[in-house]
Image (cartoon, rainbow, N blue to C red):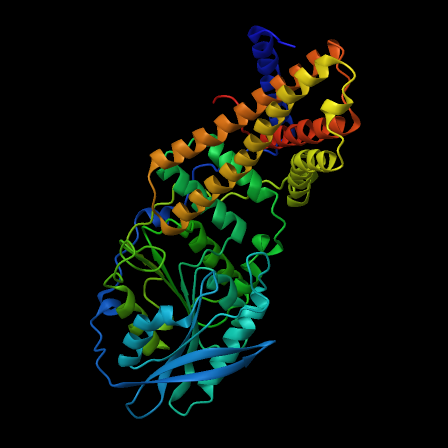
Amino acid sequence: MNVGRSTLGFAAGVLLVVLAAIGYMLSPPAFDPPPLTASPEFSNLPAQPASETRPVAATAPIRTEHVKVAAKNETLTATIKSPTTPGRHPAMVFVQGSGSGSGSEFTTQSEWLAKAGVVTLSYDKRTVGYNFRQRDFSLLADDALRMLHTLLQRSDVDPAKAGLWGVSEGGWVVPIAAASRDVAYVVLVSSPNVSPLRQVAWALNEQLLRLHAPSGVRDLLTRAMGGVGFDFLRHDGVPALQGMKQPVLALYGTTDPSIPFVESTETLTGALRTAGNPDYTIRFLAGADHAMRMTGGPFVPDYLPTLANWIRDLPRTAKPSVPIAGATPVQRFEASDVPAAPWYGGVTILWLTICLAAVGYVAAPVTEMVVRIRGRDTRLQAPLEPVVDIWPAVRRRLRRMAWTGLGELAAVLAFITLIVLFSVNQAGAWPAVQAGWLVVRLLAVVMLLQEVAAAAAVLSGLRDGWEPTRWQKSVLIGVLGGTGLLLLTAAYYGLYAFPW
């Protein structure tokens, strides 16, 4: 039954090369975004006019109201903060970014703006029709318009200065809502303007570069992204941008690691030129992150004054003397599209593979348990002595193999979760990424070695006259076959690629 270590090593080496070749041939084109060649104007932007950042007296007394707003298939809770001073005031609706967040995240901004004379409304995001897999930006735009109409019904709101503010994902929502003539102006904060898939891929690439992650990590993640069948990821926001006719204020932070801000600006200005809309103001704020804060802390000093002065001084500020100004933005790489996965790299096939492997692994102990309960233990059926000696050893190998396969799946999921958390929180250290990648690849190699060793043990036993029973054959097919499927999946995702 014993096979020489040199023979096993040679077989494992050959299989490793075969799997690496299979991964190379079956995988989609590599995701390798080229360096960005931006327009020359971005290399030497004029300073932001001082009049835009002049101090704002945010001292007016305010009141807070909580209202219910009927939306499609749901009733949303909104909070309105308004100055108590008489007369009509500018008004603004906060439209959230991604996630099922609460309107309370805008409390600081809404209170400050209300004290500065702007009526604000923030609302809890819908839970019906919005989730991780499905996002209807038109539905979200309808929610935003309903909130704006709630403000327009108030006697203290100036309809000529009532608009929408959108951050991040809200940059795909607000332009859709802006097709309504009721929207007097638009404020876009950290608006991607490229497709969600390109934005996520760009942000992920930037984070992996910061963490000094091996190139294989990027290949693993982008191949997984290319197989995701979420339609909203390939949303094209340009047509909606081209439909905006009202004044637009776009604010970007020069330290924002989440969006390709230079390309986003070029996309926005190109769309507005197509629309024949020259009324745009684009400002790059030094040191601002995705939320216009300084490394997650307080807002950068110029953000709120720029926002308040622009809104309150409309329509004069709709036509700035300098359309694009502020700190110099530096975007290293293009926001390239992630290559679409072939049919066998899609989520459906991936889940089918995992389910088949899991069934194979579960079938082994279940089958053995059923056989023992029914009193058909192999030791009672064994016609020859070698059967008693061979099967326990093979069974131990199969059990270790099944645990390794399950461990590999858990390690990959944990590793992807780690990278996503690092990217979302803009945190993490490169040793954690290196260690996680090492664990994932080592488990893949161990799984390969166990498959080779188990197959060799079975072949050796058959050569020595072992005749497995029917249930033993089912266990062998289930575990060896399930592991084989996982090996092919690992090959597709580059876990056996060279260099290591």
Q: Residue at x 62, y 9 (%)?
A: 2
Q: Residue at x 62, y 19 (%)?
A: 393
Residue 383 position (above or below residue 130): above
Total marks shown come to: 0
Q: Residue at x 49, y 45 (%)?
A: 201
Residue nearer the viewer, 76 or 471? 471
Residue 434 at x, y percent in the picture? 39, 32
Q: Is residue 410 left or right of residue 431?
A: right
Residue 446 position (above or below residue 55): above
Q: Residue at x 25, y 57 (%)?
A: 47
Q: Is residue 217 left or right of residue 50?
A: right
Quadrant the N terminus occupies: top right
Residue 292 at x, y percent in the picture? 32, 60
Residue 202 at x, y percent in the picture? 46, 45
Q: Is residue 241 left or right of residue 332?
A: right
Find residue 311 and report its image quarter. Answer: bottom left
Q: Is residue 413 visible?
A: yes
